[in-house]
Image (tube, rainbow, N blue to C red):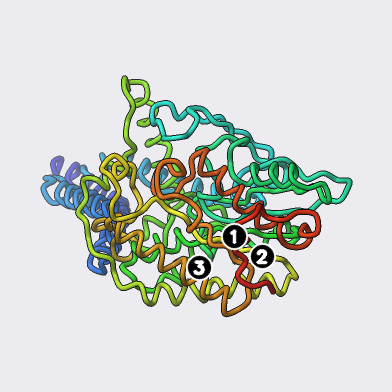
Amino acid sequence: MRQEAPLKNRELEGSRSSPSSRTLLVAYLVHLLVPFLFLVDSLLAVLRGEGGTVEREVIAFGVAWVLVGLGALAVARDRGQFLRHAAGLLVAVYALFLCLGLLELGVRMETRYFNRAPLFFKPGSKMVLDLTPWPRVGVSPKVTFSVNALGLRGPLPPHEGRVYKIIAVGGSTTECASLDDSEEWPHLLMQRMNSLQTQYFTWVGNAGVSGLTTVDHLSCLRRLPILSQADLLVFLIGVNDLEAALEYGGASTQKTLERKAELFAEHAPAGVREAGGFFRHFWLYPMTRTALLDLALRWKIARAHEPRRSDQSKRRSAGPILPLPDLQLALQEYAQRVRGLEQECQVRSLRCVFLTQPSIWRADLPQSERDLLWFGKIGWRGHVHGYASAGDLARAMDAYNQTLLSVCGKDHLECYDLAAAIPKDTSAFYDDVHFNIGGARMVAQFLADRLLAVPPFRQRYSLPAGQAHGRLQGR
């Protein structure tokens, strides 16, 4: 009888603890659903041809997490005791999930509603960039990048006097991030126009942002009042639309670029993208990755004892050279995007000038200049498989430029063939398409001479003898 009492007490304790054990078991299995769902999502992205290194890493991590979790539960001799020991770890895991979720929400809210810049850069910000470890042909080793209160690069426009306001719109070839405030072509354009005429004070603001396409420009034109307040918008366009077409293998990029434009309008961090697994949709991932890469970069710089090539150019040199995809659909979409900008300019009664995109690309580039290249990624749905040759890139860029000229000619738009005026060598470029100091001067001189040869400046200025102003046809 004395032995039966402890036995009954143990059975009673076991019956009381069983609901807790079941709760722990459910909590344990549910926590495995998170890596499992990411695993399945990334696997589906890979099967669709959209998966890259990130998706494969997520798959490997998810498989390891799920197998270790299920394996530990399966081999445990006393499952109840195992779950009780794991309870503290489960609390920590769920707390981590909650914190990450709240942090993701907080980052999006802060970016969207509390720290929203007019364009991209924070108004009034100033950066000093040290390019010494990566010397670029014709570029100063240290540059200053300043943003005014309007969110544009350059000074503020004057409040008094006759002011003609120009805003340059484009991607990185307009932004000129590797050039000093005094060296970027919109600033040089302003200086040249003011030195050659006194009818108006010409102010030029720089609205270039690296990576933007014509889809982004249309979105910015529709939502940013500052662009509609200009007397003239200058669009230097084409290369980023071409890059997107190559990365998508010539397939349609319209919906993808529209989604990218929405993310840019929300000021989502670089790296958030539509293609690929759900993991890429989180804002925390690219922000964390960028921070880690920045730390690694600082460590490399500290250890560097000689000039270094960029990681992008190294990857291009090591990657396979692939033939160009069929760009017919991409060129049709590009033509429609140019017409979209045209229509928006007409709705807002804005004078808009379009420029073709110059590049260093040509079939006979010497090896020293081929080593500078890093554009031309060819892939499928944004995932790189190889690179286009310099000769193929030249033909592709020419096709985009000719498409722009054709639309301008048919629709009587103001357009200048800048690409035909810039030499394809390091006197103008430090890589594929980005201008060095010499190239920026060439752009400013070319554009100033043509703008000053047409109203409202024509009556006070004319082009030097022998120069055609290159205007296809005015509106």
Along the line of sight, which residue is nearer the eye, 347 or 301? 347
Q: Amino acid at mark 3?
A: Glu
Q: Quadrant of the C terminus?
A: bottom right
Give the residue furthest to the front. 465
Along the line of sight, which residue is nearer the eye, 100 or 120? 120
Q: Position of residue 304 (x, y in %)?
A: 32, 22
Q: Secondary structure at mark 3?
A: helix
Q: Position of residue 400 (x, y in %)?
A: 44, 67
Is residue 224 left or right of 199 when viewed as pictured? left
Separation (CA) of disc 1 from disc 3: 18 Å
In the rendering, which numbered label is found on residue 309?
A: none
Q: Label 3, on which residue?
A: 258
Is residue 374 left or right of 255 when viewed as pictured? left
Q: Position of residue 122 (x, y in %)?
A: 63, 42
Mark before the other along the chain sequence, 1 or 3: 1
**Where, by quadrant of the figure, is residue 367 drawn?**
top left
For the point 80% across and 59% down, the residue is: 459
Q: Label 2, on which residue?
A: 352
Q: Label 1, on which residue?
A: 235
CB contact under 8 Å: marks 1 and 2: yes
User: Label 3: how many residues lie within 10 Å, few (<14), some (14-19) or many (20+)?
Assistant: some
Separation (CA) of disc 1 from disc 2: 7 Å
Q: Amino acid at mark 2?
A: Cys
Along the line of sight, which residue is nearer the eye, 20 or 458? 458
Q: Secondary structure at mark 2?
A: strand
Q: Quadrant of the N terminus?
A: top left
For the point 29% across and 42% down, the residue is: 371
Asked whether residue 25 appears in the rendered view, the answer is: no
User: Label 1: how many residues lie within 10 Å, few (<14), some (14-19) or many (20+)?
Assistant: many
